[in-house]
Image (spheres, rainbow, N blue to C red):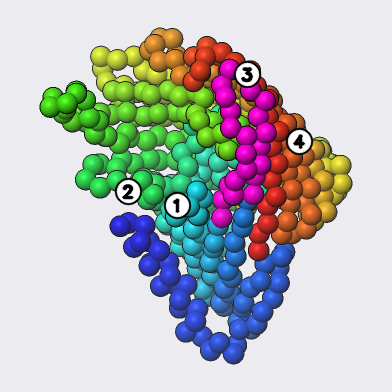
Amino acid sequence: MKKYYLIAFCLLFTGSLFAQDFNDLKLKVSKGSVQMATDDGQFTFGMGGRVYMDAAAYFDDKTDLGSGSEIRDIRFLMKATLWKKWDAKINVGFANGAVSLKDVWLMHKINKNSFVRAGHFLEPFGIEQTESSKTTKFMHAASTVEAFRPGRSLGISYATWGKKVFWEAGLFGSDVNNNIKEEDEGYGVTSRFVFSPMQHDNILHFGVSATHRSINPVEVEKGYGAFVYTERQQKISYRSRAATHIEDRRFINANVENAESQYKLNFEMLVASGPVSLQYEHISAKVKRESDFEDYSANGWYAQLGWLVKGGNYKYKMKSARLAKPGPGAVELLARYNQTDLNDSDTMIMGGKQKDITVGGTWYVNHNVLVKFHFTNVDLDENALNGEENFNMIQTRLQFSF
């Protein structure tokens, strides 16, 4: 029920826009998006959406992989600015025929360089985790990010930034899409700090993120037949797909039982000079377990290169502490190496190790349309889903938004 209360709350604020005389609203187009605004700039309102259409061909090794195509995601969003000081956003996803809440929040702009936000949104952890799927460079998140990211949660955060520093911190409950009812949903504290001494002809950026979260208890059925009983467990899982979504199986998967809390630490770096960029993230995770059990540790990292062969130089946004999206007509060549290790021999939890290399490119046709093409090689160790194997894939995406 929490998600429906949240939607109603944001709709109430958004609806106050229409209390204005509708004749005072002016239409304008900004970066391919249509907006309505009052003459005095006190109120703006916009609606939009996006569609991702993917196709993939897999070249099998041991596992029989299912080549095919899909509508990866459909989004519909509404956003509004009220009295210049308040922003509201509702972003709903329809992937795989199921409705899920994405960004549903209300933001108060304290001044031009800080805000407080409450609702359902991405926790401030690293670069790729905090970036919209609409602007991430690759079709699929790096395996390391997919395995360890905290994702979207219901919470409140404060963010501020200056000429060289960005900082955001928040307190979070659960993801409202999980529909946790009677059990304690747990809580998390997440923060991201970035220092960027260079942001113009050359870009240099260093950052660190950390998160601590209590573990949600889950009920697990055990036994057989008439002897089935329910046991409450403290459990957490780290898992990841093989750099693709059409083939939906998780090839590495670590289930950590008897968990009490988890800690994650992310180190990030961005370097860009003209049309060339390097992005790096390293994430380590530790699960504190009950006193009779050894603590579990895992880690992963990726490094990706970008080259704008057409479209000028890379630009930086201090407000989000990330690279800006290349402009219309740009052509970007990309390469990424990723390594994710979910094996911990001390605890005998061997979730598997994945290495993957992706090369490809993106054509930013205009503000609304882009095309992606990737070739990926995946290498898995003996602890992966079907043991040691190596396979390749070709993937492409047509993406449009409005």
Indicate the position of residue 366 as horizontal and vertical percent values: 78, 58
Q: Nearer the viewer, mark 1 or mark 2?
A: 1
> Is the C-beta separation of discs 2 and 4 under 8 Å?
no
**Residue at image mark 3:** 61
Give the numbered dot on residue 179.
2
> Does label 1 or label 3 sit earlier along the sequence?
3
Q: Nearer the viewer, mark 3 or mark 2?
A: 3
Q: Secondary structure at mark 1?
A: loop
Q: In whole angstroms, how far apart are the C-alphas of marks 3 and 2?
A: 38 Å
- Residue underneath mark 4: 360
Question: Closer to the observer: label 1 or label 4?
Answer: 1
Amino acid type indicated by mark 2: Asn
Work out whether residue 106 can be spotted. Answer: yes
In terms of sequence position, does the residue under pointer 1 or pointer 4 come before the other?
Answer: 1
The answer for how far apart the CA atoms under marks 1 and 3 are is 32 Å
Give whichever of discs 3 and 2 has the lower sequence position. Answer: 3
Magenta stretch bounds: 53-74
Name the quadrant of the N terminus: bottom left
